[in-house]
Image (spheres, grey):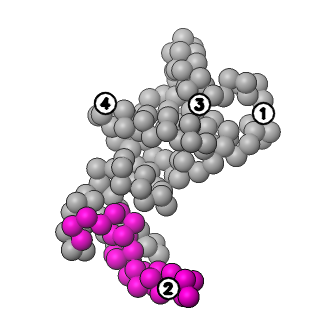
Amino acid sequence: VASIRRLDKNTVNTRLEKLVSAFQLGEYFDTPIAALSKGNKQKVAIVAALLHEPQLLILDEPLIGLDAFSSKILKELIIFHAKKGGAVVFSTHIMEVAERLCTRVGIIHRGRMVGEGTVEGLRKIVKSAEGSLEEIFLKVTEQETGVQEIIRALEA
């Protein structure tokens, strides 16, 4: 990754040292990627994505497989990246994470964008002053009633 991005060796070593330490990958540094656990493979992919300090981060389900420690580190890095002026586009099925980290969200259902904007703006659209992003998602995708029916059936 570093050679593709034409990063100089000192820059690579400095950044790599910080990221490997942050994601607790030091003991696996010489381990082939194929031999790593799913979580550690995910950490390696994240380190590779962050190594060249891109202006735009595109992350697909970046928290999958991460332990709580690494998940927290990544979320804080996403916030820091945005505060520095970078942009982050990521997909997640964890609505609480999207609600906490995103200034704008897009709701995709069955391959179509069915809602887009700030969480506050989406609350207004669905007429729910305090609804969570999960509740907004269920309303926008017209799944709220189905969820309630299933819960009632399971509780019976």
**Which portion, as a residue range, is magenta?**
128-156
- Mark 2 touches mark 4? (CB < 8 Å): no
- Mark 1 touches mark 2? (CB < 8 Å): no
- Amino acid beneath label 2: Arg
- Mark 4 touches mark 3? (CB < 8 Å): no
Tag 2: Cα neighbours inside 10 Å, few (<14), some, or many (≥20)? few
Which residue lies most toward the front here? 156
**Pointer 3 residue:** 23
State which quarter of the image contains the C terminus: bottom right
At horizontal 39% and vertical 66% (from top left) the residue drawn is 134
Q: Which of the labelled discs sits on residue 32, or is there none?
A: 1
At horizontal 34% and vertical 75% (from top left) the residue drawn is 140
- Return the x and y of residue 74 as percentages of the image width and height: 49, 38
State which quarter of the image contains the N terminus: top right
Marks 4, 3: nearer the viewer: 3
Does the stretch in magenta take in 9?
no
- Return the x and y of residue 9 as percentages of the image width and height: 57, 14
At horizontal 56% and vertical 36% (from top left) the residue drawn is 69
**Pointer 4 residue:** 84
Q: What element carries label 2?
A: helix
- Amino acid beneath label 3: Phe
The Cα–Cα distance between marks 4 and 1, rounded to whole angstroms, is: 33 Å
